[in-house]
Image: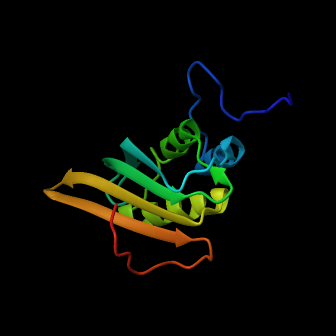
């Protein structure tokens, strides 16, 4: 059996990512061959970023749904990746687009949908969706929602 080098520790505490770029490397290295599944859905219910205007934390959720081509997203690497945004100043819409672009590049899925939900602050909840396809087309509208 060939030795596999993992980016993240197999057990014990997970180190904090130094940057989003480092976390993208973990996504790429930890991805695994896709079994015969049609759709995968990950729902991260604890997501934190920073409002670029106020510097206050924005709490929310990230939902990723994709149709694998050759690779699947490893959940621990996904958690590590999301953790990298904890100190990043970004709008909800920018986060949805960035996460979709990063995961699309790393996994090259047939179809990918990312929904970022930010919990209410000032009485307003926000939800942004980004969709990518294998052809590299960014869809303006998607009929079925997550």
Quarter of the figure with residue 14 = top right
49 relative to 78 in the view: left or right: left
Most distant residue in the front direction: 36
Q: Which of the colour schemes (rainbow, by chain, secondary structure, one colour) is used?
A: rainbow
Quarter of the figure with residue 111 = bottom right
Image height of 97 relative to 79, above or below: below
88 relative to 14 in the view: left or right: left
Most distant residue in the top direction: 12
Asked whether 53 or 9 is in front, the reply is: 9
How many circles with numbers are drawn on the protein?
0
Q: Position of residue 45 (x, y in %)?
A: 35, 42
Q: Position of residue 80 (x, y in %)?
A: 55, 39
Q: Residue at the spot x=29%, y=54% of the render?
A: 118
Most distant residue in the right direction: 2
Most distant residue in the left direction: 123
Asked whether 140 or 60 is in front, the reply is: 140
Image height of 114 relative to 86, above or below: below
Q: Position of residue 57 (x, y in %)?
A: 33, 46
Image height of 105 relative to 43, above or below: below
Q: What is the quadrant of the C terminus in the image?
A: bottom left
Asked whether 85 or 55 is in front, the reply is: 85
Q: Residue at the spot x=45%, y=44% of the render?
A: 86
Image height of 6 relative to 136, above or below: above
Q: What is the quadrant of the N terminus in the image?
A: top right
Q: Position of residue 65 (x, y in %)?
A: 46, 56
Q: Residue at the spot x=46%, y=63% of the render?
A: 113
43 relative to 78 in the view: left or right: left
Quarter of the figure with residue 129 = bottom left
Q: Residue at the spot x=61%, y=50% of the render?
A: 36
């Amino acid at each position: 059996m060939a030795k596999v080098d993992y980016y993240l520790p197999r057990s014990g505490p997970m180190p904090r990512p130094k940057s989003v770029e480092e976390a993208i490397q973990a996504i790429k290295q930890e991805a695994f061959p896709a079994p015969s599944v049609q759709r995968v859905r990950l729902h991260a219910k604890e997501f934190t970023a920073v409002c670029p205007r106020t510097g206050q934390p924005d709490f929310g959720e990230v939902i990723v749904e994709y149709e694998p081509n050759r690779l699947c997203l490893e959940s621990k690497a996904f958690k590590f990746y999301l953790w990298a945004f904890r100190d990043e100043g970004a709008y909800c819409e920018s986060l949805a687009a960035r996460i979709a672009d990063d995961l699309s590049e790393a996994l090259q899925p047939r179809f990918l949908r990312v929904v970022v939900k930010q919990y209410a602050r000032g009485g307003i909840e926000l939800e942004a969706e980004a969709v990518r396809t294998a052809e590299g087309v960014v869809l303006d509208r998607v009929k079925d929602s997550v």
